[in-house]
Each structure stands twice: as C-alpha cells, then as structure tokens.
Amino acid sequence: MVMPATEFALFQHRPFVCFWLGRVFTSMANNMLAVAVGWQMYDLTHSAMDLGLVGLVQFAPALLFTLLVGHVADRYDRRKIITLCLALQTALIGVLIVSTHHHWISRDLILLCSFFIGTAKAFQMPTTQALAPLVVPAEVLPRALALSSSGVQFAIIVGPAFGGFLYAAGANTVYALCGTLSIISACCFFSVRIERQAVSREPVTLRSIFAGLDFIWHRKAVLGAISLDLFAVLLGGATALLPIFARDILLVGPLGLGLLRSAPAVGALLTSIWLARNPIQRRVGKVMFAAVATYGLATLVFAFSKLFLLSLVALAIAGSADMISVVIRQSLVQLETPDDMRGRVSAVNSIFIGASNQLGEFESGTTAAWWGAVASVAVGGIGTLLVVAAWMKHFPELVRRERLVQK
C-alpha cells in the first residue's frame, strides 16, 4: 500500500474514511447517550453516588472480560466484532426507549442497561484500537490516529450539546437518535476493507492469555505511559459530576450540561487538527508529562469556578492537554506492538482507559457524596499533579523518551 504521508491523502483512502466515519458516529451516539442517561438518573434519584455507579457498572465488564476480549480480537474478524457490539448497543437503547415510554424506567433498570452497554464497549473499544493499524501503513499511523481523534472530538462537541438540546423534547428523542447513529456506525465499520487480517493462530494457553499483560510489563515506557493516563484521569476526571455542576452550581440546565460535556472536546479537536499537520517528533516524553500536568491544573480551575464561561475554558484546556497525551500514548502502544498481539495488548490498554474514565466516574461520585462536588474535583486535580511528579521519578526512561519510534 503506497500513500503520501499527508493528512489529506488519508481522506482519499476509502478504508480509512469508513473507519473514521464509524468512530465519529459511534462517539456521537455514546456521548449523547451519556448526557441522556446521566440527566435521567439524576432526575430520578438526585444522588451523586448513583451517577458514579453508572460509570462503575459500565467499567465492570471491561475488567471481567479483558482476557477474553483480547483473544477474540486477535482470532476473529475485527470488523464483525465491532458490528455485533454496536448491534447489541442498539438493542439496549431500544430497551431504554420502551421503558421510558411506558414509565418503567428506574434506577436499577438504567444500571442494568449500563452494564450491558459496558459489555458491548468492552469488546468494541480494544477491537477498534487493534483495527486501526490494519487500515493505514505504519508510517502514517500517528497522523491517522490524530485525524481519527479529531473526528471523535468533533462528535464529542456536537453530541453532548445536541443531546442536551434534544433532551428538552424528552429522553426518548435522544435515545432514538443514538440508536440510529449506532446502526450507521455499524455499517461504516463493516464496510472497512483491509489488505490483511492479523489473525493469531497461537493455541489458547495461560501464557497466550496473559501475553498482553506480559508484553506491557516488560516495556517500561509503554507501562509508564498507560498507567500515567490511568491514575491521572482516574483522579482528575469530573465528567460524572457535570450534572451537579450544571444544575446546582452553575445553574445552566440540560443545555448547559451538554455544553460543559462538549467543552473538553473543543480544545481536543483544535489540538488534534494541529497534531495531524504537525505530529510531535521530539521530546515526546517531556511533552506528555507537561500535558498531563496542564490537565491537572485546568481541573483545579474548573473545581473552583463559579462562572459558566470560565468553567467552559478550563474544561477546553483540559481537553486539549488530554488529547496530546492520548495521541502520544496510543501511537507509542500501537507502533511497538506486533499485529498478532494487538488485540490482547489493546484489551489491557482498554482496561486502563476504562478505569480512568468509568471507574473515575465512580470515584468522583463517591468522593462527591462524602465531601461535595467542588472538593471532589479539587482533590482530583491535586492528585493528578502528584501522580505526574511520582511517575517522572519512577519512569525516567519515559521522561527521556525522544521519539515515538526508537531508531
């Protein structure tokens, strides 16, 4: 496969276009769904703990099925796996629509649907990560990941804001659109054509099952990068508490909640577009640590802000910093992993991502129930800065990492 290494050539490559569209529509559906589920749960229970539980039950399947997910992604057609996951998600959205329409919706039903949606995501996320290197050649993978992330961030901007706007017409209006987008994204992924299938023929043994963990453990730069993201976002994430900030602190309602959820993606989108044209080629380790520290500082500003505009700016800066970290980390992991192990390594990586996001939502909800939303987010921001300092000390080889691809 020959392709000029420019971001514009990528959009002339049909498999990448299908992959890109699939990620965009999936992300838009997921983020609109998060707004609707979060607002509906808070309307039903007025409980910060229950908002956190939504994140916990979505993370649990990723933890339970990690080893199985990796083997499935390495042994079967990754496009079909993603399509089946999106079909399951669409069915679960249908359950939410029917139960809401007939007034059967409840805290427990939302948590149950969230668990099975989390199960679909547990298989979908690592499989999508493992599919990306099969769509484009290695020399343009960092650009492809940046462009793919820019599409996702655009969806994160549009999805929550549009979801918050549509919620005024009822939760089912949002759910119906989410289901439609899930079907469209399934069609996009199924249409991806690749030149090779990275199918592992290795027998299923305990050694092969734990190969992903072993691979990451023995590559300290990779271990340091993904664990830094885990603990920084686990402590610093405030997403689960945004309904509380929107309703009780900033007083901006469902539309304001959508804008708050979109703000990090605004910063991330602008940054990902810049990274697609200007990939980070030197001092990648120092740049990543600086980005995570900036994320922690922006989280602190958001925690104490009483102004809606300032809160939006702080979240946008946090999103921009996080995007830099994500592109460096994902590029490093994918470029150092053999094709036939990408499913297992991506599955382990997804546990770190899921822990930092869904488990982070549970941590935020729990600490908010103890100390209040403002204190919970502030402590998280401080914790992020402490994690950066600790990781710079314990992973000096990552600090000194000069380039994504070692020569």
Image (cartoon, rainbow, N blue to C red):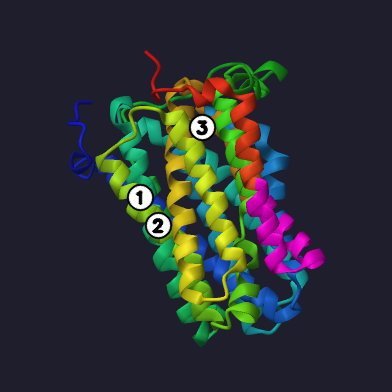
Measuring 40% from the left and 53% from the top, which residue is drawn there? 268
Quick one: label 1, few (<14), some, or many (20+) residues within 10 Å? many
Rendered location of residue 24, percent (x, y): 39, 55
The residue wearing badge 3 is 76
Going by the numbered disc 2, the residue's amino acid type is Gly
Residue 198 vs 116, above or below: the answer is above
Q: What's the CA distance linking mark 2 and mark 1?
A: 6 Å
Residue 36 vs 354, above or below: the answer is below
Q: Is residue 239 left or right of residue 150?
A: right
Q: From this viewpoint, which residue is outermost toward the right?
A: 370
Prevailing secondary structure class for the magenta stretch in the rendered image: helix
**Residue range highlighted in magenta:** 358-383
Going by the numbered disc 3, the residue's amino acid type is Tyr
Which marked residue is nearer to the observer: mark 3 or mark 2? Answer: 2
The residue wearing badge 2 is 267
Q: What's the CA distance linking mark 3 and mark 1?
A: 34 Å
The residue wearing badge 1 is 271
Quarter of the rendering containing residue 48:
bottom right
The reply to whether the magenta stretch includes residue 209 is no
Q: Secondary structure at mark 2?
A: helix
Q: Quadrant of the N terminus?
A: top left
